Amino acid sequence: SMGNSDLELLRDIRNQENQALVQKYYDAHSTLPPLLSPGLVASLSAPAEYASPSYSYSAGSGSGSGFGSSTGYVDVAASDDIARHILTFAQNLSKQINSSNRKTTVFSPLSIMSALALLLLGAKGRSYTELIAVFGQSDMVKLHEQFGLMLQDVQQPTRQTTSPQRQLDAWHSNSIRRSLRTYPRNRNAPQEVHVANGLFLQYGYSLNPDYRQAIIQIYKSDLQTLDFQRSPAIAKYNINSWVEQHTKGKIENILTDDLPQDTRIIMANALYFKAMWEIDFIGGATKVEEFYPNGEGTQPVLPVEMMVGAGAFPYYEDPQLNCRIIGLPYHGNLTTMYVIQPMRSSVVELAQLQQRLTADAIEHMIGQMSRRSIIIAFPKLHITESFKLHSLLERMGIGGIFNPVQSDLSLIGTNQPAAAAPAVATDRSHADGLASLRNLVAQRQAAMSVQGPTPPSDLIVSDILHKVDFVV
């Protein structure tokens, strides 16, 4: 089981700490108008009810405008391309994390990318350029629509909602009989997946109506108004409670420090996953065994609780990467945990393998797997991780959102008093969500066509917090 959450703290760029940098910007471009004060927040309503997605298949290109027009259906080529970029992001982030420490690390690339998608939706200028490079697309309407549908799809992991056009990996072809067997009475549904997005706004901060409509309709986001200035303790309690609720108690107190009073928005993403194994580990066979971090027969030797299982598991050995991969399918055979290990595993060998792994290499190995009769020993795991992504993302080329001069998230807020802000649409249909996506694209393009520099937005990302609780 796993629960994880991300929090993005967006602060007012106009606080005293950032004023010197902003003033330098204005001194260089003295014809620019001053930043306007934010207005009152628009009225907020609950997100639309979940609707099961349906599917279509496109044989066209899986990148850029090759995705084609928006249809409201999960597009296999588009979703596969997004999934590859998520896997690539995971590999790149893993390399950055492991370059600074050698300890066990666990994180959720899907959760982090979901949080970045909410920033991308409201970004312009350098912030947009850096974020869009992570997703690798140019058709913003198609990207956000498909990513939103994928997040709905992952929460409905049944064979009835799996696209009939999607090609299963080779080892799945002889697994249908296994997946259709009845579940024991002491088991619940085959697996449970829950993804949630939330925006917590400072009372008095006005969202761009198109941004608001898109995050509700496309990303099914919850919206709450809080008072970070007058009631920071209550605000922190409400956010911690939201995260704890959506991770079913796995993530508690993600916010421990006091929130800065200039906080304007906190964006949150939570992911919860729990499933039973397709092939159970043998009950009563778990015992303490010797574990060798630096390779068998070396020091130190650590006592570790090892589980033992036997059965036909998907398996492959890659001679080029000198590693092996095993799949541990979950009940229902729709989700699998893949474990990749060097042939002569050690901390050093594992770090070197991580540097060579790519999304394409992982996909290739999975495609080559076949079921083999295997006896497996696997350690019991309970790993908790909490870290900040600011410096890691900067090293990956995503630094503009943290810089008070370079940050441009001006499509998120109206940056004008509520009385002057456009009326917020109340119809929460999928079509209106797509219309808002197109409006945001048009607003971004209009800003690019303006001659001369534009003023920075009133928002800067203070940090992105990521917390994970992982149990095997």
Image (spheres, rainbow, N blue to C red):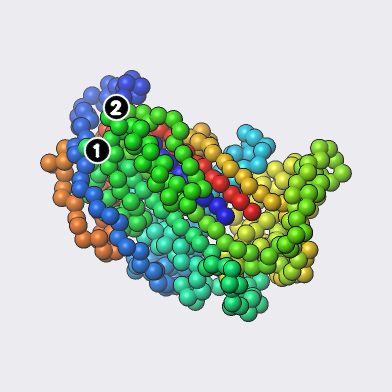
Query: Would residue 191 appear left or right of 344 to someone viewing this image?
Result: left
Depth order, front residue of 181/113 = 181
Figure quadrant of residue 315: bottom right
Question: Residue, x 61% and y 78% (percent of image)?
Answer: 181
From the image, tell me which residue sits under label 1: 203
Counting residues from the start of the chain, the first of labels 1 and 2 encountered is: 2
Mark 2 element type: loop
**Vertical arrangement, residue 168 with respect to residue 366, above or below:** below
Q: Quadrant of the C terminus?
A: bottom right
| Dot 1 alpha-carbon crowd within 10 angstroms: few under 14, some 14 to 19, many 20 or more | some
Q: Amino acid at mark 1?
A: Tyr
Could you say where residue 171 lies in the image, as x and y percent from the top left? 66, 71
Q: Residue at x 72, y 51 (%)?
A: 379
Decide if residue 199 is in sight here. Answer: yes
Residue 392 in percent (x, y) is at 53, 37
Q: Which residue is mark 2?
A: 14
Residue at the image position 66 percent from the left and 38 percent from the top: 103
